[in-house]
Image (spheres, helix red, strand yellow):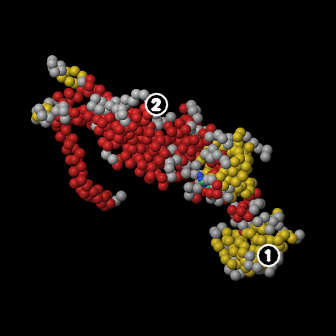
């Protein structure tokens, strides 16, 4: 490349940046502004009516893991908080696993249909997005609650005598989240499988691989970007889920999202809510880092 | 056949689709392929070459008939248990693996010890001269290099039979010639039976021990290259393998009588006389024997020229003669010539 061409190129690059500067500035402010406010609030003191008092304090952050005994003022590990964290992580991992187990065959099925049919199947997958999350969650509630569709039908058929108690349990939350987030798993998986060259299957079988071996050594490593994308798209919103645990888990089976909401509402502890939000953000980022690192490093070490 | 048979196809039929819309990709195909042979399936597009190969590999089940490998019926056996490997037309190399990992894949799936996988991989890399590229990803290779990886990957597990589906068709002419030589070398060195698919008759003639010429799902003729070229059994084989003049004749006790009335001695029987363009001789008109003909056109081909001729009754004929060098015999349109046949050149075939 000649020097003239080079300066031409750097000029056009610079112009590109200049042109997109307003949009970038706006994006940056929009993304970081609210976060900054939350970050600042997490270091303040709760006010009496749910606002904040501008006194620096670490109580918000300490409150994530510890509670101060109201009688003697000693600090104790907050078991209730840990339970909520653990439930959130566990349910999110389970949701990711279940949506993968259901989503992979679904995506494979769609990707192997004739092209004319594929659009129709994808369209069907996206139908749930047409209604609002709250309504979809209430629909699940209607199906699984004690006097709901499932129990009525099963009792009617005489298969069970007592209704299956699902509502207000972790299982209900798990089922609900898997239902709600399934399309987010299917779509990136479909995109990856759609690009997969089906001739590689024959190559695998030809080279003595069994069906399981073809799945493990050919399909999974090649569609891995889709698996990573789908898992992130499901895991992240699951971890911060609010509506589903609220509607299906009742008041007791809280997840982090509900716990944060509690601090800004009845709890009147905005700094703790803010600190919890930041902690959630950090957990998500850490999880993503670990996951991406693990899934992109040499898929098949030599030999 | 006295040699051991590696592959047998017995009355194999393969139909795709149902009822009236069904396509008979293979129609009662029977063939024995000997161990250690370089066997070529030659035929035009859509004649069923790939289908036959896929039946041998086990990717498809025959509608009727049997496939035997080394005398054992494998018709129902899945591809991963057949001692057969394929070099795919599109190579189908694993994009997530390196060159070495691709080559070792088959052995690894067979559960061979790591040391053996590594040793064979190294050996194969040397065999296809890709030692320097062992750790590259497939996307970093040229077409010819990918082709060689595909070959090494299929050879590494030492299959009894190697199936090659037009492995050279994606390469440019020069590389293709080079790979033809290499393929032949690999086949001789490894002693593995090769079943090679091509629609290029020259490729088939230069590389094969035997050729099966196919058309419309049927095998038309099986034979050594020379036999196929010099003694084609029907019009399809004669026209598909090399260029041929077809002349309608009537059989007489003296020989075959052309439409011009001339009588020509010819082997075989049938109502069509075939003669290759290079087996015709052109001499000055009116001197000695020969069919009277008029030159209707001359096409220059470098080493030789094609002279288009018209016999007395208008029958068209093409002769291929050496290029005139520095004032040697040349032909001009409209010139009268006498056409003679090389001894034994003319053959009769059935329509
Ligand atoms: N899966 C299939 N479904 C329907 N028809 C098929 C299928 N596979 C092959 N055919 C048909 O069978 C016939 C033979 O196909 P095949 O692929 O064996 O031809 P080929 O000789 O390999 O041709 P080419 O030189 O173009 O590769 C063709 O008419 C083809 O359309
Ligand atoms: Mg083919």
Whether residue B261 can be seen here: yes
Percent across and percent down for residue A265 are 19, 35
Q: In the displayed image of the protein, which residue is found farthest to the right?
A: B253
Residue at image coords 72%, 75%? B316
Mark 2, Cα crowd under 10 Å, few <14 / some 14-19 / many 20+, is: few
User: In this figure, which residue is indicated by the disc labeled 1?
Assistant: B259
Could you say which is closer to the camera, residue A220 or residue A117?
A: A117
Hey, which quadrant is residue A178 in on the image? top left
Q: Nearer the viewer, mark 2 or mark 1?
A: 2
Residue at image coords 34%, 37%? A141
User: In this figure, which residue is indicated by the disc labeled 2?
Assistant: A159
Apparent side of residue A235 relative to residue B323 in the rendered image (left or right) = left
Residue at image coords 46%, 33%? A157
Q: Secondary structure at mark 2?
A: loop
Chain letter for the residue marked with disc 1 in the picture? B
Mark 1, Cα crowd under 10 Å, few <14 / some 14-19 / many 20+, is: some
Could you say which is closer to the camera, residue B279 or residue B275?
A: B275
Percent across and percent down for residue B199 are 64, 58
Apparent side of residue B45 relative to residue B349 in the rendered image (left or right) = left
Apparent side of residue B183 relative to residue A66 in the rendered image (left or right) = right
């Amino acid at each position: 490349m000649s020097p003239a061409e080079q300066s031409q190129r750097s000029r056009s690059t610079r112009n590109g940046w200049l042109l997109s500067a307003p949009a970038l500035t706006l994006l940056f402010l929009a993304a970081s502004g609210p976060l900054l406010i939350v970050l600042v609030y997490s270091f303040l003191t709760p006010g009496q009516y749910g606002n904040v008092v501008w006194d620096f304090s670490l109580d918000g952050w300490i409150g994530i893991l510890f509670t101060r005994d109201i009688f003697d003022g000693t600090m104790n590990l907050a078991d209730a908080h840990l339970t909520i964290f653990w439930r959130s992580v566990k349910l999110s991992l389970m949701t990711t696993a279940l949506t993968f187990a259901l989503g992979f065959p679904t995506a494979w099925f769609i990707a192997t249909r004739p092209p004319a049919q594929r659009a129709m199947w994808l369209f069907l997958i996206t139908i749930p997005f047409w209604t609002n999350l709250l309504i979809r969650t209430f629909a699940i509630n209607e199906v699984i609650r004690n006097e709901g569709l499932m129990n009525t039908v099963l009792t009617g058929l005489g298969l069970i005598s007592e209704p299956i108690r699902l509502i207000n349990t972790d299982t209900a939350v798990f089922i609900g989240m898997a239902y709600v987030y399934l399309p987010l798993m299917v779509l990136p998986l479909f995109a990856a499988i759609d690009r997969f060259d089906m001739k590689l299957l024959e190559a695998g079988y030809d080279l003595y691989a069994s069906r399981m071996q073809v799945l493990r050594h050919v399909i999974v490593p090649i569609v891995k970007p889709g698996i990573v994308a789908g898992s992130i798209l499901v895991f992240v919103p699951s971890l911060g889920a609010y509506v589903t645990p609220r509607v299906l888990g009742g008041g007791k089976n809280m997840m982090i999202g509900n716990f944060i909401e509690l601090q800004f509402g009845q709890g009147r502890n905005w700094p703790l809510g803010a600190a919890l939000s930041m902690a959630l953000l950090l957990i998500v980022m850490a999880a993503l880092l670990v996951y991406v690192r693990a899934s992109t490093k040499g898929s098949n070490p030599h030999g | 056949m006295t040699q051991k048979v590696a592959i047998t196809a017995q009355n194999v039929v393969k139909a795709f689709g149902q009822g009236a819309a069904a396509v008979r990709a293979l129609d009662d195909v029977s063939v024995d392929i000997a161990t250690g042979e370089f066997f070529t399936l030659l035929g035009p597009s859509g004649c069923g070459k790939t289908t036959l190969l896929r039946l041998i590999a086990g990717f498809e089940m025959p509608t009727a008939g049997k496939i035997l490998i080394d005398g054992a019926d494998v018709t129902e056996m899945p591809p991963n248990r057949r001692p057969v490997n394929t070099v795919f037309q599109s190579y189908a190399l694993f994009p997530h693996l390196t060159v070495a990992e691709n080559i070792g894949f088959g052995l690894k799936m067979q559960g061979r010890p790591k040391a053996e996988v590594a040793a064979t991989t190294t050996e194969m890399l040397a065999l296809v001269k890709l030692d320097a590229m062992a750790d590259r990803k497939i996307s970093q290779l040229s077409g010819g290099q990918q082709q060689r990886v595909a070959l090494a990957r299929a050879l590494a597990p030492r299959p009894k039979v190697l199936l090659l589906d037009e492995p050279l068709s994606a390469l440019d002419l020069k590389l293709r010639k080079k790979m033809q030589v290499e393929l032949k070398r690999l086949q001789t060195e490894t002693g593995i039976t090769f079943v090679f698919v091509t629609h290029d008759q020259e490729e088939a003639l230069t590389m094969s021990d035997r050729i099966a010429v196919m058309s419309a799902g049927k095998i038309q003729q099986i034979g050594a290259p020379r036999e196929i070229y010099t003694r084609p059994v029907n019009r399809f084989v004669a026209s598909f393998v090399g260029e041929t003049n077809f002349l309608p004749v009537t059989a007489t006790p003296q020989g075959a009588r052309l439409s011009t009335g001339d009588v020509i001695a010819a082997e075989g029987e049938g109502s069509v006389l075939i003669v290759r363009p290079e087996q015709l001789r052109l001499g000055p008109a009116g001197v000695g024997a020969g069919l009277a003909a008029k030159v209707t056109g001359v096409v220059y081909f470098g080493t030789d020229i094609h002279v288009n001729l018209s016999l007395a009754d208008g029958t068209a004929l093409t002769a291929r003669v050496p290029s005139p060098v520095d004032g040697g015999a040349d032909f001009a349109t409209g010139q009268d010539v006498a056409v003679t046949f090389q001894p034994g050149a003319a053959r009769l075939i059935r329509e």
